[in-house]
Image (spheres, grey):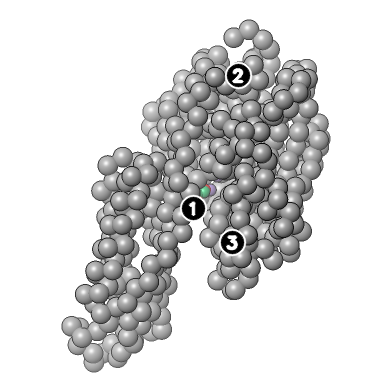
Amino acid sequence: MSGPDLATLVPDHDRLERDLTELATYVDPDAPGWTREVFSDPYRAARDWVRRQMVDAGLETTVDAAGNVVGRLVGAGSGKPLVTGSHTDTVHGGGRFDGVVGVVGAIELVRRLRETGTELTHDLVVCDFLGEEANEFGLSCMGSRAIAGVLGAEHLDRRDGGGRRLGDAFERFGTDPEGALRLAWAPGSVHGYVELHVEQGPLLERQGVPIGVVTAIAGIERLLASFSGRADHAGTMPMGERRDALAAAAQAVLSVEREGCGAPVHGVATTGRIESGPGAFNVVPDHARVWAEMRSIDAEWLSGAKGRIAEQIASDAAERGVEVVLEWLNDQAPVPTDPSIQDVIGAAADDLGVPWSAVPSGAGHDAAHMAHLGPMGMIFVPSRDGRSHCPEEWTDLADLATGVHALGATLLRLDAWSPS
Ligand code: GLV
Ligand code: MN
Ligand code: MN
């Protein structure tokens, strides 16, 4: 491709490393790993840090009603913006790279564009979206949902385990929940959205390929199953006469796992949490709850899995005389990335002489919601041993830099691209 010299856009490795290291200092000192959960004090401090980096990089920076930190590099022409970004919240006990890479990588790219005098025609908007990770309110991607116009009043009425309302949590954090409901950018108002992210799985490392072009983002179905049985003396009640809620819940855990193991394409099923009571050695448990989820890029498998799991759990519980209530929470449907953007990312990697491979995303991303606003794509970089959502999460600096470079090459191509 003729145009700007791509070699000049190589990110500054030291700056990238410094940014990752600095951002990693904003964590909960009393929690494991790198914990920076949404609405927490370290999260607030980290976002101030992100805002300062955006301002210093030359971005016109605002914090919108939903708490997204949004920086704009004004382009030479008019028209719809190019948008990139990701998130800086983490799961409890999480790592340093999930989401962070797409934010600090985009800021470093802006620095390189300005330092090399590379002017885009389109505005380039960089977002640090509020609260991407699933939280105690059972909602992920809160900031990008607001921008995409899919955050509803019913979401703000959700309550966490302590009975606190999500809308009130927004307010306490200094954001404007009512304003967030009116924030929506117009459908079709984005020229192209591209998010750089760590893969969080093992495919790229196993293939020895530094860049992944994401084909689709998995859909997620979440299940809260509540079991009610009967408390009895654990020493005296005969085995065949019990109504053991925890045993029914344990069977549900295995049914969920079995469904994931039997998935024909990309499909996974996980129980992330189980609780039961009264919780003594010598009492048969009378209640239990199970939090589980299924994910796949295949909508048909996902809805089939949902039905099969519901049936299995209900019939296993009934055999034990245990009642079960199943509450389903759809997080998102599978979202394919735009084929044209996939082509552009592949061509950009070719421009850099970097091997790439097409991969699905088993993780959820803000990109899934930004797809409401315009053509969307994602660039992955390898995760060591496929580990993520744990302190061991790691991506080599060289791979991160390749990802930032590929993001730059992609955005330059998209700047000159018109959708057909
Ligand atoms: C977010 O990281 C998710 O996939 O749950
Ligand atoms: Mn993420
Ligand atoms: Mn995550």
Q: Secondary structure at mark 2?
A: loop
**The N terminus lies in quadrant:** top right
Q: Amino acid at mark 1?
A: Asp
Q: Secondary structure at mark 1?
A: strand
Is the distance from the Cβ of mark 1 to the nearest ligand 1 atom less than 8 Å? Answer: yes
- Kindly identify which numbered label has been placed on residue 402: none
Please determine whether, in this image, residue 406 is positioned above or below residue 376: above
Q: Which residue is mark 3?
A: 154
Residue 59 vs residue 41, the one in the foreground: 59
Ranked by sequence position, the earlier of labels 2 and 1 is 1
Near mark 1 (Cα within 10 A), the count class, few <14, some 14-19 or many ≥20, is: some
Ranked by sequence position, the earlier of labels 3 and 2 is 3
Residue 198 vs residue 67, the one in the foreground: 67
Ranked by sequence position, the earlier of labels 3 and 1 is 3
Residue 131 locus on image (x, y percent): 62, 52
The CA distance from mark 3 to mark 2 is 37 Å
User: Is any part of residue 343 visible from this angle?
Assistant: yes
Q: Amino acid at mark 2?
A: Ser
User: Is any part of residue 257 visible from this angle?
Assistant: no
**The C terminus lies in quadrant:** top right
Q: Which residue is mark 2?
A: 418
Please determine whether, in this image, residue 159 is positioned above or below residue 368: below
Identify the residue at image location x=64%, y=56%. Answer: 38
Q: Quarter of the picture for ligand 2?
A: top right
The CA distance from mark 2 to mark 1 is 32 Å
Is the distance from the Cβ of mark 3 to the nearest ligand 1 atom less than 8 Å? Answer: no
The CA distance from mark 3 to mark 1 is 14 Å
